[in-house]
Amino acid sequence: GNEIQFGGGFIDNATRAQFFDLPYEVWASVDNNGYVENVFDRLYVEYIGGEWDYDQNYVKYWTENSVYNFEALVNAGDSVIEQRESDGMLTSLCYNVSDQSDLLYAKETIYTTTNDADLVTFTFKHLLSQVYVRFTNRIDNPDCWINVSSIGVKVADNAVVNFGQDGC
């Protein structure tokens, strides 16, 4: 088969998708007629010389009649990540918000009929900045505060991202 390659990334904003060249990390699995296995495990992909590339020691190839599932993160840093044993896909992530960066997440599914598929491209969504919480104070005393130590967001069937100031 042909080498699995990555294309550009886009950030999905409310008004338009915006191209970016930030490095990202990829997890991927393949289902080949019921046999599911890990393809990439936190593969670092970066934009170098006008192309997206990764360490050639980790090159994988497309197989025909298969279903590939990809997940990608931007700004994951030193997050604590848990993965399923069966296919290596994300189950949970503990993201420290103290560095003021938003975590970007994307997922993509590709169905192959031959051993040659298009570039894998991602449309990333902001996770933390998409959390909206509204509180109404119906107490006579206007001095009211809320201290939230962590927030959890379900990003996929079995994957949850937890955001916390000093860990989750």
Image (cartoon, rainbow, N blue to C red):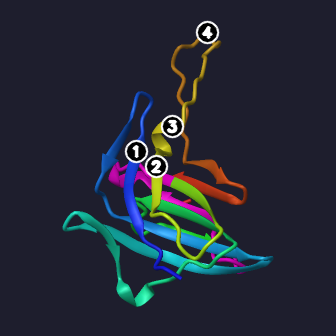
State the residue position of label 2.
124
Q: CA distance from mark 4 to mark 1?
A: 43 Å
Q: Residue at x 62, y 49 (%)?
A: 152
State the residue position of label 3.
130
Foreground tag (4 vs 3): 3
Mark 1 crowdedness (10 Å alpha carbons): few <14, some 14-19, many ≥20: some
Residue 167 visible somewhere in the drawing: no
State the residue position of label 4.
140
Q: Which residues are magenta?
A: 84-105
Identified by mark 2, the residue type is Phe
Badge 4 or badge 3: first in the primary sequence:
3
Foreground tag (2 vs 4): 2
The C terminus, quarter of image: bottom right
User: Within the image, what quadrant is residue 66 found in?
Assistant: bottom right
Q: Is residue 97 magenta?
A: yes
Direction from residue 78 to residue 65 in the image, left or right: right
Direction from residue 85 to residue 116 in the image, left or right: left
Foreground tag (3 vs 1): 1
